[in-house]
């Protein structure tokens, strides 16, 4: 073992959770990501959740903005299409032990149509999440408080689980007085997320990360009598992050990230029947960078669909897989 030890309080953590509102022909959610890095040690992607827990007794403040610009196909102003969705997320995390962290997230969504359409914006369902960290070193064990640089080369894993609370207005009325579940400000009932991550630092500068997760929803009856259960979401992510530079004197580090994000959406169920123009599969490519300075971390990424197989492709304008691009910004501070 090297004499130098790397203590987790030096690390920066970018949190993760499930979110938010969706329905027919509308992008469902904004989703965040977990990760940790410092001047030494493994890197953290922007979208894929990395295998890190918060240092015991430490707090994390987190902000994510996901701006999803939709492709439009009908130039007729009498038929406005979805213009963009913007998902904001504020989060706060706490390290209960070196291997157990808890988080609370408050999202704010903006769903905007072209001129003449119907827009919605507002705070949505609060969400809670717990993360358990463990590693493999001649056997599985919980993440210890301190690890040497050699220890950080071991495989690290997390298991996470959480739920939303029905704090948002699921029966939010649009400008014309109607309720569109795809533009509502909550699910009406709790939704549930769970998943696993695996992280391996394969060299001094390179890290690979893998994640598998699922989000499940419950049936909710809206004030207009419509019963909706959104389709289950299955996510498989892989990422490669490379340390481009590190300056110990200024405590600055810059990483480059390449990611692939698979999303499989089940068909929504409306009044007991599968809803048209919902569901499908898609693969996103993500190119980004993450900068670290002292106890701050800033991540930026461009995300684009590179393959889609939607259920009714020509009817799903504004949904996942039909974006022109997504711009993602994350900012976190450990204290």
Image (spheres, rainbow, N blue to C red):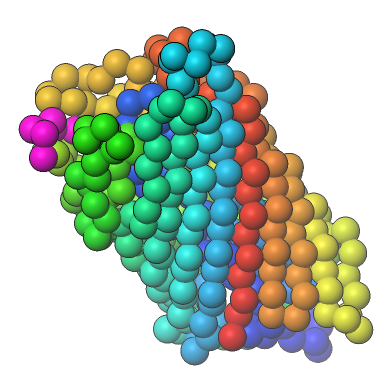
Question: From where the camera sits, is residue 262 visible?
Answer: no
Query: Which residue is depicted at the point 48% across and 59% down?
Result: 89
Which quadrant of the rendered structure holds the C terminus? bottom right
Q: Is residue 45 above or below residue 233?
A: below
> What secondary structure is the stretch in magenta mostly built from?
loop
Which quadrant of the rendered structure holds the N terminus? bottom right
Residue 269, quarter of picture: top left
Along the line of sight, which residue is nearer the eye, 43 or 158?
Answer: 43
Residue 225 included in the magenta stretch of the image: yes
Whole-percent x, y for residue 184 in the image: 29, 42
Q: Determine whether, in the image, residue 315 is placed left or right of residue 203.
A: left
Along the line of sight, which residue is nearer the eye, 127 or 196?
Answer: 127
Range drawn in magenta: 223-232
Whole-percent x, y for residue 45 in the image: 66, 54
Residue 23, quarter of picture: top left
Whole-percent x, y for residue 262 in the image: 53, 34
Along the line of sight, which residue is nearer the eye, 189 or 1?
Answer: 189
Question: From where the camera sits, is residue 14 visible?
Answer: yes
Residue 273, quarter of picture: top left
Query: Which residue is depicted at the point 74% across and 48% down?
Result: 288
Query: Which residue is depicted at the point 63% across and 65% down?
Result: 331
Q: Determine whether, in the image, residue 281 is placed left or right of residue 274.
A: right
Count all numbered tags in the image, as a single digit: 0
Residue 199 included in the magenta stretch of the image: no
Q: Is residue 198 above or below residue 281?
A: below
Q: Is residue 272 above or below residue 102?
A: above
Whole-percent x, y for residue 268 in the image: 27, 27
User: Which residue is most to the left?
Assistant: 225
Query: Which residue is depicted at the point 24% across and 45% down?
Result: 172
């Amino acid at each position: 073992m090297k004499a130098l030890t790397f203590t987790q309080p030096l690390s920066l953590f970018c949190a993760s959770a499930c979110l938010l509102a969706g329905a027919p022909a509308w992008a469902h959610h904004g989703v965040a990501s977990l990760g940790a890095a410092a001047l030494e040690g493994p890197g953290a992607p922007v979208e894929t959740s990395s295998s890190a827990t918060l240092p015991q007794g430490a707090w994390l403040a987190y902000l994510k903005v996901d701006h999803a610009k939709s492709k439009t196909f009908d130039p007729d102003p009498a038929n406005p299409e979805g213009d963009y969705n913007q998902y904001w997320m504020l989060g706060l995390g706490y390290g209960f032990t070196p291997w157990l962290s808890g988080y609370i997230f408050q999202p704010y969504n903006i769903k905007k149509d072209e001129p003449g359409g119907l827009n919605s914006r507002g705070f949505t369902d609060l969400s809670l999440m717990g993360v358990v960290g463990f590693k493999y070193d001649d056997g599985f064990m919980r993440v210890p408080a301190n690890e040497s640089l050699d220890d950080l080369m071991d495989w690290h894993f997390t298991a996470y689980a959480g739920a939303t609370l029905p704090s948002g207005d699921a029966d939010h009325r649009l400008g014309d007085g109607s309720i569109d579940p795809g533009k509502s400000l909550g699910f009406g009932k709790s939704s549930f997320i769970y998943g696993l991550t695996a992280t391996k630092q394969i060299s001094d500068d390179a890290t690979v990360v893998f994640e598998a997760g699922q989000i499940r929803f419950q049936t909710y009856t809206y004030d207009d009598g419509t019963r909706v259960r959104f389709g289950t979401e299955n996510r498989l992510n892989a990422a490669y992050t490379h340390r481009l530079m590190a300056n110990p004197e200024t405590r600055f580090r810059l990483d480059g990230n390449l990611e692939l994000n698979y999303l499989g959406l089940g068909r929504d169920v409306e009044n007991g029947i599968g809803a048209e123009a919902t569901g499908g599969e898609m693969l996103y490519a993500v190119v980004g960078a993450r900068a670290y300075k002292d106890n701050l971390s800033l991540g930026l990424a461009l995300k684009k669909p590179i393959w889609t197989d939607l259920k009714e492709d020509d009817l799903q304008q504004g949904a996942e897989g039909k974006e022109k691009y997504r711009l993602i910004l994350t900012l976190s501070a450990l204290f």
